[in-house]
C-alpha cells in the first residue's frame, strides 16, 4: 500500500519536472573566490564559469559578427578599477555538413579580471555587480541570448 | 509489491521512449500547419491562407543563430532553383525587430520574404507538443525547416540536431522533389 502511494506521487512529479523552463543558471554557473587586496594595491579576480554538460556557448571572440559573443560587464566602483579581461582560447565546434567552425566554450573555463584600488580606499568589503552575457546551444536547440547577474566580493585590508 | 515496482519501471520506460521517439521523428506530419499572417521586412503581409496552392518551405531563424546562418545561403539557392516549380521559401525570424533583421540578413541577399514574428506567437504555435519541454515554446522551432503542401498540411519538419546537421538541406530537397514528382 505504501508503495502504491509512492507510485501516485512519482508520476505527477515526473510530469511537472518536464514542464519547467530552463533558467540561465540551468545552463551555466559562475563562481568567484573572494579577493583580498590592500589599499592602493592590485590583484586579479579569477572567475570560474561552469557550463552544464551538453551545452556550449559562443566564445568571447567569434568568427562571425552576427553571433553573440560571451561578454562580461562589471559595474565599477569609484574606488576600484578593472582592467582588460582575459578569456581563454576558444574551442572549435564543427558545423556538420559544412566546412565551417564555431568558436565556443564548453565545460569549465576561467576569466581573469585584473583590478586595482585607489590609495585612499577605506578598508572593508566591496561588491562589484557584474553580468555575464552568453548565447548557448546544445545538440537539439539554440537558446535565446541570456544574462546571468552576480556580485564579486573584494575585501580591502 | 513486486508487480507495482514492475509497473513503475514499465511506466518510466514507456514515458522515456515516447519522449525519445517524439524528438527523433519528424513531428506534426500530416497536420494542418498553424495559420499565420506576418509582416515581412519588405513591408508586405504574407498569410498561410493566401499561399494555399503552393508548396512552402519555412525556416525559423534568429540573426544570432549559428545553424540558421549556416543554412542561409542554401535556402537562397533552394529558392532560386525551386521557384519555377511552385515552391515559395520563407524565413520566419523569431522575436527580433525589423531594423536588426534587415541589417543582419543584408549579407545573404535573400530574394524571398523574411517574415517577422516579433512576439514569437507563430513560432510558439509551431512548437510540437512534448518536444523540448524545458524550453520556452518560441525557442523550440528555431533552426527548423518545414515543407507545407498545397493544402496547407505539414509534410516535412526537421528540428535542429547538431550531430546530423544538414546545412545543405539535402533531406528537405529530397522530400520536396518527391512531393513535386508525385503530382
Image: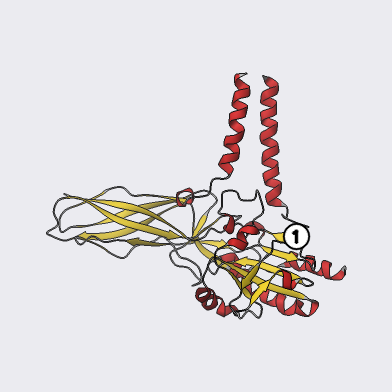
Residue situated in front as seen by the camera: B116 or A123:
B116
Residue underneath mark 1: B32
**Secondary-structure class at tag 1:** loop
Residue A118 is left or right of residue A44, and the answer is left
Q: Position of residue A113 (x, y in %)?
A: 31, 59
Answer with the quarter of the image where residue A93 lies: bottom right
Residue B109, compared with residue A24, is above or below; it is below
Q: Residue at x 66, y 35 (%)?
A: B12
- Tell me which colouring the rendered structure shows: secondary structure
Q: Position of residue B63 (x, y in %)?
A: 54, 69
Q: Residue at x 62, y 65 (%)?
A: B60
In this view, the residue farthest toward the left is A120
Task: Name the chain under label 1.
Answer: B
Residue B12 is left or right of residue A58, and the answer is right
Answer with the quarter of the image where residue B6 lies: top right
**The C terminus of chain B lies in quadrant:** bottom right
Residue situated in front as seen by the camera: A40 or B97:
B97
Residue A154 visible to an observer of this rendering: yes
Residue B142 visible to an observer of this rendering: no
**The N terminus of chain B lies in quadrant:** top right
Residue A47 is left or right of residue B99, and the answer is left
Q: Position of residue A91 (x, y in %)?
A: 50, 60
Residue B49 is left or right of residue B100, and the answer is right
Q: Position of residue A74 (x, y in %)?
A: 31, 60
Amino acid at each position: 500500500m505504501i508503495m502504491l502511494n509512492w507510485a501516485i506521487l512519482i508520476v505527477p512529479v515526473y510530469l511537472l519536472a518536464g514542464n519547467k523552463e530552463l533558467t540561465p543558471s540551468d545552463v551555466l554557473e559562475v563562481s568567484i573566490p573572494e579577493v583580498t587586496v590592500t589599499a592602493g594595491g592590485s590583484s586579479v579576480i579569477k572567475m570560474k564559469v561552469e557550463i552544464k554538460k551538453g551545452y556550449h556557448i559562443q566564445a568571447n571572440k567569434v568568427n562571425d559578427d552576427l553571433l553573440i559573443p560571451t561578454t562580461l560587464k562589471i559595474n565599477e566602483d569609484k574606488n576600484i578599477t578593472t582592467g582588460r579581461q582575459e578569456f581563454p582560447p576558444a574551442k572549435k565546434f564543427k558545423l556538420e555538413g559544412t566546412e565551417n567552425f564555431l568558436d565556443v566554450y564548453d565545460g569549465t573555463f576561467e576569466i581573469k579580471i585584473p583590478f586595482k584600488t585607489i590609495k585612499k580606499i577605506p578598508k572593508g568589503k566591496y561588491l562589484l555587480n557584474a553580468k555575464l552575457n552568453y548565447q548557448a546551444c546544445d545538440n537539439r536547440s539554440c537558446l535565446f541570448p541570456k544574462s546571468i547577474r552576480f556580485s564579486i566580493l573584494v575585501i580591502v585590508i | 509489491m513486486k508487480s507495482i515496482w514492475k509497473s513503475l519501471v514499465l511506466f518510466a520506460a514507456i514515458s522515456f521512449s515516447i519522449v525519445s521517439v517524439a524528438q527523433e521523428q519528424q513531428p506534426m506530419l500530416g497536420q494542418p500547419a498553424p495559420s499565420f499572417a506576418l509582416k515581412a521586412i519588405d513591408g508586405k503581409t504574407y498569410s498561410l491562407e493566401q499561399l494555399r496552392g503552393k508548396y512552402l518551405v519555412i525556416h525559423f531563424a534568429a540573426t544570432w543563430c549559428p545553424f540558421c546562418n549556416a543554412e542561409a545561403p542554401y535556402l537562397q539557392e533552394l529558392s532560386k532553383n525551386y521557384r519555377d516549380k511552385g515552391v515559395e521559401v520563407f524565413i520566419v525570424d523569431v522575436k527580433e525587430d525589423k531594423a536588426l533583421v534587415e541589417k543582419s540578413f543584408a549579407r545573404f541577399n535573400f530574394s524571398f520574404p523574411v517574415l517577422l514574428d516579433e512576439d514569437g506567437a507563430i513560432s510558439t504555435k509551431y512548437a510540437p507538443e512534448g518536444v523540448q519541454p524545458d524550453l520556452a515554446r518560441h525557442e523550440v522551432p528555431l533552426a527548423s525547416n518545414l515543407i507545407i503542401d498545397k493544402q496547407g498540411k505539414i509534410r516535412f519538419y526537421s528540428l535542429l540536431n547538431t550531430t546530423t546537421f544538414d546545412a545543405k538541406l539535402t533531406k528537405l530537397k529530397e522530400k520536396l522533389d518527391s512531393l513535386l514528382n508525385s503530382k
